[in-house]
């Protein structure tokens, strides 16, 4: 793998960082395109996307501190190379970005569900690209395996992320990357055919939650334990969050669908 693309003087340009930037730009492009289709102002969506990125970065780091308490025990660890290089916890980034979006959408006086429907496919596309960065860096690695598509990481990746060397591992980064690409295609198709606002973000919650829950069985990197729940349930932190997200997504879709079905269409006075 290639954790570093090249050096500018003594400063390494990491593959993960470059792909993360590309993921953000791709997600924002898709969101602005779909938002424009729903009549949302594109300039507001770009502003919103930038602030949500910042909120997502903060949220991912905060959840990492909760899941990995050793980072929070000494504030000096928050400035360590290991902590800064870490991408954080995805669900923390999602929740941080969502909270930022909720606050700003009200301020910008935009339709909340139209905005989330516009961003959901872009988020899935960004995940697909971002996980390729994880694969290049060697983070989020999988369990040892004998399957033909197992991968082995190099010494440089081991020094950066701690990934085991000399052993074939499940390429869980690629599993999620390909799955997220499929989710993006489904959501992009659904956006044009949705029956009610909020249907796309609800579908994303269910599809990604199921995907992440499944892939976690193949992952083997340290992912921490919140309140001892991982030890108690034998499920990872992300799996527990995934169960909540899927259940919430199903309930949300049912309630929105029932509400949309009960809306009586206005009479067509022109044809009358």
Image: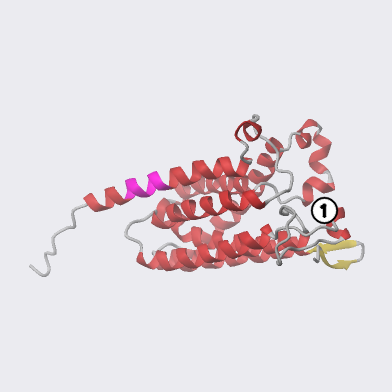
Could you say which quadrant of the image residue 124 lies in? bottom right
Which stretch appears magenta? Answer: 250-256
* Helix, strand or loop: magenta stretch: helix
Q: Quadrant of the C terminus?
A: bottom left
Q: Is residue 147 above or below residue 71?
A: below
Q: Secondary structure beneath disc 1?
A: loop
In the image, residue 251 lies in the stretch drawn in magenta: yes
Closer-to-camera residue (144/236): 144
Q: Looking at the image, how many numbered discs can be counted on the residues?
A: 1
- Mark 1, other Cα within 10 Å: few <14 / some 14–19 / many ≥20: many
Res 51 seen here? yes
Q: Residue furthest front?
A: 146
User: Which residue is painted at 78% across and 52% down in the image?
Assistant: 85
Label 1 sits on residue? 164
Q: Is residue 156 left or right of residue 72?
A: right
Q: Is residue 173 above or below residue 272?
A: above
Q: Quadrant of the N terminus?
A: bottom right
Residue 50, image x and y in percent?
A: 60, 56
Residue 152, image x and y in percent?
A: 80, 62
Residue 264, image x and y in percent?
A: 18, 53
Residue 96, image x and y in percent?
A: 59, 45
Could you say which quadrant of the image residue 191 lies in? bottom left
In the image, residue 242 lies in the stretch drawn in magenta: no
Q: Residue furthest left?
A: 272
Q: Is residue 265 left or right of residue 66?
A: left
Q: Residue furthest right?
A: 10
User: Which residue is painted at 67% across and 57% down in the image?
Assistant: 172
């Amino acid at each position: 793998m290639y954790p570093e693309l090249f050096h500018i003087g003594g400063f390494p340009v990491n593959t993960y960082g470059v792909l993360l930037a590309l993921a953000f730009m791709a997600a924002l492009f898709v969101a602005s395109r779909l938002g424009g289709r729903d009549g949302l102002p594109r300039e507001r969506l770009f502003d919103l996307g930038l602030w949500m990125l910042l909120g997502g970065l903060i949220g991912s780091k905060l959840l990492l501190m909760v899941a990995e308490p050793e980072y929070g025990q000494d504030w000096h660890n928050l400035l360590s190379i290991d902590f800064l290089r870490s991408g954080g916890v995805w669900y923390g980034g999602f929740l941080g970005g969502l909270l930022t979006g909720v606050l700003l959408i009200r301020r910008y006086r935009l339709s909340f569900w139209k905005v989330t429907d516009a961003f959901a496919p872009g988020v899935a596309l960004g995940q697909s690209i971002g996980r390729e960065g994880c694969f290049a860096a060697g983070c989020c690695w999988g369990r040892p395996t004998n399957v033909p598509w197992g991968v082995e990481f190099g010494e440089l990746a081991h020094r950066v992320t701690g990934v085991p060397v000399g052993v074939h591992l499940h390429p869980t980064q690629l599993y999620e990357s390909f799955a997220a690409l499929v989710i993006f295609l489904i959501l992009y198709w659904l956006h044009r055919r949705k029956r009610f606002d909020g249907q796309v973000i609800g579908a994303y919650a269910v599809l990604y939650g199921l995907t992440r829950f499944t892939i976690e069985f193949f992952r083997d990197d340290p992912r921490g334990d919140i309140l001892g729940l991982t030890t108690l349930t034998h499920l990872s932190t992300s799996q527990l969050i995934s169960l909540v997200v899927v259940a919430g997504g199903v309930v949300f879709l049912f309630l929105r669908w029932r509400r949309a079905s009960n809306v009586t269409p206005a009479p067509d006075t022109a044809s009358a």
